[in-house]
Amino acid sequence: VNLNGVLIEDTFAEAFPMRATRLVVTADKAAWARTAALSMTGFATSVIACGCEAGIERELSPDETPDGRPGISVLLFGMSSKDLAKQVQNRVGQCVLTCASTACFSGIEAEESLPLGKALRYFADGFQIAKKLGSKRYWRLPVMDGEFVVEDTTGLVKGIGGGNFLILATSRPAALAAAEAAVVVMREVPGVIMPFPGGIVRSGSKVGSKYKGLIASTNDAYCPTLKGQTETRLGEPVEAVLEIVIDGLWEDAISRATAAGVRAACALGHEGGVVAISAGNYGGKLGPHHFHLHKLLA
Amino acid sequence: MSALVLTLREAPRRTIDASPLLPERLMGLGKRQIAGLPLHTGNCRIALGDLFTIAPGEAETLVLHGATGRLDRVGQGMTRGAIRIEGDAGAYLGHAMRGGQIFVEGSTDLLAGCAMTGGVLRIEGDTGDFLGGALPGERTGMTGGAVLVGGRAGDRAGDAMRRGLILVQGRAGDFAASRMVAGTLVILGRCGADPGFGMKRGSLLLGEEPEHRLATFNDNGRHELPWLRLLASHCAGLGWSGRLPGADGARLRRLSGDLANGGKGEILIAEAPA
């Protein structure tokens, strides 16, 4: 398949089940909600070493948030409920509780839940106040700028991590321009985050390493400087590859984000230096979710 | 299908225990079965059909019509459905109610919503003492659900209340939130003397300065409290369209007490507009 002169390889992205939650952070000003969200989702690119993968889903207008203030919705993904619970507690405790004027709420209804205010309330040292309004319980924690309001729990759902595609281009600027264009449109899709810096990964990895104890190492087949030195997957014109990794709450959200991203990257066309679009998988034996590029673009 | 309507044939001379009049109990019953249901008044038993005329309908919504002011215990222990009282109601309205909705067009006697644990109770007119309170001898009042009163409330509203929301749009009597354990009581009109007497935890939000304040409450200063925005949207979700003090970011006077009982409760008082 060819899109605007760009070869779409007949392959698929292989993704894995994860546990996920959505948090809504509000503040007096949208900028402070964003500051808290950026802080909370920092160092959350990959579960390999960060404990969770997290990112900003979208901005929320005051009429979309529980307390009528500007807000941000954030998605967090972990490998297990336990891991995710720890990450939510640490990240909200260190990055939202501490951030001026904020409040934090569950952004998703689900049968299962993770502790949120339930875990953080002890910070108030006995001065915490529970407020049950309807079916929801909130905690009011006295802090130095007034009260930090936080919902008791947040919904816990099954998510999918590791959706991806690769942009193969004739130069680093060309690859980056295509990846940037892709991320812009992908951020419009609800239910997904691209957890890597700016939504883009340049150090794609393979499983294993020649060194003992390293579970992942550089994906040499896609490193342009190793052409001729290793069993490469890159043709003659390719000089740079960038990957976009997608975590989503639903399979459909990842499919839509992937399709939108690939189309945006290909819009730059062969003249823009984009040579091919590929995807990362492990032969289909490890992950239950397969995103076939040709099917998504059909 | 229209609602099941029960109309009193004449004004009862004595109070009637109307606790059997529950949508969940009447559902699936025919007109004759409903007419045969026994009701108690004093030490007498009367068939429902002798007191009411019955217009059959879907009992999911039960309408009580006529001189209903002497019907006690309407909606007692109710779990679902809706009751609409087109007039006044007696005492113990919605006693120990667990779910569903009760709407009263008129006023009620004392102990409305006492010991209720869920559901929504709406009274358009006034109500008596111990609104959402504890039964005499009991230590716990309302533990869930919401009570909205359009008019005035009597003394000791929210007595020993533990959870849930009571909102009184008009004035209230003395000792509001007495012995309150937790929960939220809002009184938008002026309330009588000594609110929060024996209060342990919980929030009492007042639209005006009370007639007299207890000495066992400490002044915490004026504050903007973000949780009031959540309370306002919760009230709006219950169909209440009024303005809640502090929900717009205005500062409220906060008092903590009752210091004679731990002092973890709060009274929030809206400041008079300048």
Image (cartoon, coloured by chain):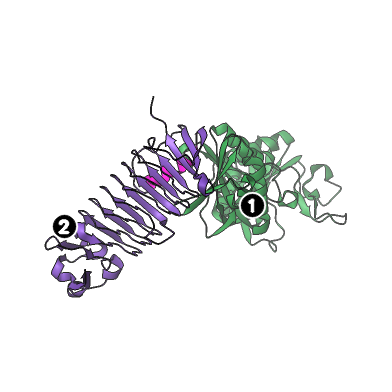
Camera sees residue A35: yes
In this view, which residue lies farthest toward the top?
B274
Q: Which residue is mark 1?
A: A77
Q: Is residue A41 something one can see in this rendering?
A: no
Q: Position of residue B104 (x, y in %)?
A: 25, 53
Relative height, residue A227 to residue B118 (above, below): above
Chain coloured purple here: B
| Residue depth check, mark 2 versus mark 1: number of the one nearer the observer | 2
Q: Numbered disc 1: what chain?
A: A
Q: Is residue B11 above or below residue A32?
A: below
Q: Label 2 crowding class (10 Å Cα cut-off): few <14, some 14-19, many 20+?
A: some
User: Could you tell whether B214 is left or right of B100 in the image?
Assistant: right
What amino acid is found at the position of numbered circle 1 in the picture?
Answer: Phe
The secondary structure type at the circle numbered 1 is strand
- Depth check: B94 or B64 in front? B94
**Range of the magenta residues?**
B223-237
Q: Is residue A12 above or below residue A7?
A: below
Q: CA distance from mark 2 to mark 1?
A: 61 Å
State the residue position of label 2: B67
Instruction: Decide whether residue B234 is among the magenta residues.
Output: yes
Residue closer to the observer: A29 or A281: A29
Q: Residue at x 87, y 57 (%)?
A: A212
The residue depicted at 19 percent of the width and 75 percent of the height is B36
Residue at x-position 75% and y-position 40%:
A240
The chain letter under disc 2 is B
* Left or right of residue B91: residue A159: right
Residue type at numbered disc 2:
Ala
Image disc number at residue A269: none
Find residue B63 and report its image quarter: bottom left
Q: Main secondary structure of the magenta part?
A: helix
Query: Residue B259: percent from the left, percent from the top?
Result: 52, 44
Rendered colour, chain A: green
